[in-house]
Image (cartoon, rainbow, N blue to C red):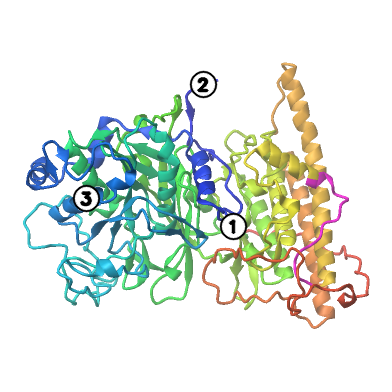
Amino acid sequence: MSMNTSLDNSTSHKASSHTEAKATKVLAVRAAVTAEMEGTWVTGTAHYLDAILGSEPPLQCIENFITESPLYANGRWTGIPRGPIRESQLYEPVPAIINAVLDYFDRSSARQAVDSSSTMMSHGSVDHELYSSPDMVIIMNGKMVDPDTPADDASSKTEEGQEIEKGSEGSGTDGGSRTDGGSGTDEGSGDDYLPTGEQHPLSAKPSYRHAPFAKPSYKNVASFVEMKQNIERSANNFRPQIATYAREIFIQQHNRQHVFGMLLTEETAEVYQFDRAGAIHTSRVDIHSDPCTFVRMILCITSMDYQALGFDESIYWSAGKRYLKVGDVNYVILNGRPAFLRRAIRGRGTTGWIVQVPGSKTLFFIKDYWKAENRPYESEYLQAAKGLLGVAQMITCENNKSFISAQRKVVLGAFLSDRLGCVIGDRALCRLVMNNCGLPIEHFPDPKQLLSTMRDAINGHQALFKIRILHRDVSMMNVLLCPTDSPGQFRGVLTDLDLAVSLDRDETLAKCDYRTGTRFYQSIHVLRAEGQHDHLDDLESFFYLFCMLCLGYSGPGQAIVPTPSVFHGWEMDCPEVAAGVKTGFVLSHRKRVEVSLVVSPSVKEVFSTVVASLRAFVMKKYLAKSERVEAQQDAARAGQERAPVAINKDFMAVADGEYTEFLGIIGEAIDELAQAETESSGAPDHLGVDLSDSTGYEPRSFAPVPEMPVASGSGNKRVSESEQSSQPPRKRSRSSKGRALPTSA
């Protein structure tokens, strides 16, 4: 076995999380970050240090600052104590040094070093009950900062005590003639004009030397500094802590491509750069004997160049709105925030935006993600899927917008992990513009449309399979409710093909790999990495998705908290454990499950029957595939070669029959609900949600929902036996079969 393994190859390093729910403690977040970042810490070479520090300002300017500054004398930074008893003794002198550098190089109007050691910085909307406190942060203002970030009263005054007008931009100059340390991109450039070319209404207002800064929060942090005593212990002890800060900056700023942090002691400093491949860091620099390099490090993490600081400049704020530029089009981002984002540092970093062209009501969906270097472009699959019903439709794309190698400014060969034998692969930032597909299926408006959305998405999956594309990542977020021309009516769409695989590569199926997909929905054979990944594994994922909607939700967007015990273990990090739990669930097909949706008893019976029928289907296919896998393993142990499953006409014919059987179960349930509507008032069993004006995905509510659902309109009371219908449930009709959606010419 080769010792030189890639940590960022075409397969995900880890299955995605189903919920990515908030951790209950910051320590739990750090533990997750530790596991995520394992083996991805890279020690940069001298070339990396020179590359990120750059050549501006000239060395002579830096030497002039050191010579003129009263903060450096006799070979030491005077305010930093020798051998401090507590790290808190660094909290005052370090910000003073950094702010002196910012002031000297004309950056104090846009950057400010703040002691944040006692500031409780919130972990955003999902982790709103979590807080953490970097020792020091560099806060910023300008077009990358959310204008709703609360202003800090203390920072809204000049040194002379003059009140700064809220919302105005600083002039960026103080009348001096010093050379700026940025790359030439002025912090205020472009901020005074709207995308239409009109002058920003605030640009005519008077400016002051110091622009107002918001209170320190992860929304306005340019970079951070963590301070430790220079005692004999490894920097590895602090890595989970600083990675947690970087993670939260990625989560709350949305358009960061990398984040800088500094680990500082009373004697040394090193800069860390976090990106979608992990983290790279400089060697330690003696801040006293090499003050010029220390100042250059400060200038690096306080850069006035947004791109150098790690921002995607095509996403920006202007006049209270957030824009995303694709080509020559400046789209307005609805609500100013993503519809979806992945919360991990490392990996694809997928972010989804609901946008519209100014002046138009038409909505579009834009997806940004970092493609592993050996993976095909998702745009290639979407181009092949043009016109397929039930599959998201692409309008345009921008591939290779950036690379990890470009962010780190080093060649790929330098990506050698600190863990011996591990090579870090490159990633490319890609952007897709698609027709808006609406909300995830968890926001289904009524039971019938839940089933219809599932049917449409499965038909889309089959349409892809017929053109030799296997999706491999069926999950809650990848099955969407797409609005139609009929008011209140939706159709299902399957999206997110960046883990898809072409079946034409070598005329055989890809092997099962537990690192591919979303853990909660992975099939048993994928979890065990047994056999080849085929359409049946994805149909099994659709079954688990349906189970979550029926057994884990009480209504649209209302996930039951805590998660019902039937799902315990499905999302375990250990794939073998998750596989064992799911095997028990699938094989216990005679055990009736309790539907948690707050619907009428007759509708509950329909859904219970669908769960039972789909479980029987999955069990039958699982056992048959297990026999084939066991035969292959026996042949391998005997030294015999057994040909893998080939994608030929016979295989596709069998697959068509399996899709028809699976879809038929759902189709019968849809017919039965439609018949029940006709026999009653003609109205569906609506669950109290109106999606007609929905403009984007709202994160799923984590408000506790009782595990025993309450009846609609009955307050908090449970449905008593006397309130339930005394009529036995009708037998299910078997009049209809699932039908494949036609493809357009």
- Secondary structure of residue under mark 1: helix
Q: Which mark is residue 98?
A: 3
Indicate whether 74 appears above or below 668. above
Near mark 3 (Cα within 10 A), the count class, few <14, some 14-19 or many ≥20, is many
Indicate whether 567 appears above or below 699. above
Near mark 1 (Cα within 10 A), the count class, few <14, some 14-19 or many ≥20, is some
Q: Is residue 321 magenta?
A: no
Q: Quadrant of the N terminus?
A: top right
Q: CA distance from mark 1 to mark 3?
A: 43 Å
- Secondary structure of residue under mark 2: loop
What amino acid is found at the position of numbered circle 2 in the picture?
A: Ser
Earlier along the polypeptide chain: callout 1 or callout 3? 3
Indicate whether 128 appears above or below 485. above
Task: Residue 303 in the image: state x and y as whole percent.
Answer: 24, 51
Left or right, 442 with respect to 112, comes to: right
Indicate whether 669 appears above or below 100. below
- The residue range painted magenta reads 585-599
Camera-nearest residue between 459 and 424: 424
Q: Are marks 3 and 2 in contact (CB under 8 Å)?
A: no
What amino acid is found at the position of numbered circle 1 in the picture?
A: Met
Left or right, 33 with respect to 116, comes to: right
Q: On the image, numbered disc 1 is attached to which residue?
A: 477
Camera-nearest residue between 416 and 612: 416
Where, by quadrant of the figure, is residue 174 drawn?
A: bottom left
Q: On the image, numbered disc 2 is attached to which residue?
A: 2
Task: Residue 456 in the image: state x and y as whole percent.
Answer: 67, 61
Earlier along the polypeptide chain: callout 3 or callout 2? 2
Query: Looking at the image, which residue sits at the far bottom?
Result: 681
Q: Is residue 593 magenta?
A: yes
**Labels 1, 3: front one:** 3
Q: CA distance from mark 1 to mark 2?
A: 36 Å
Task: Residue 115 in the image: state x and y as whole percent.
Answer: 30, 55
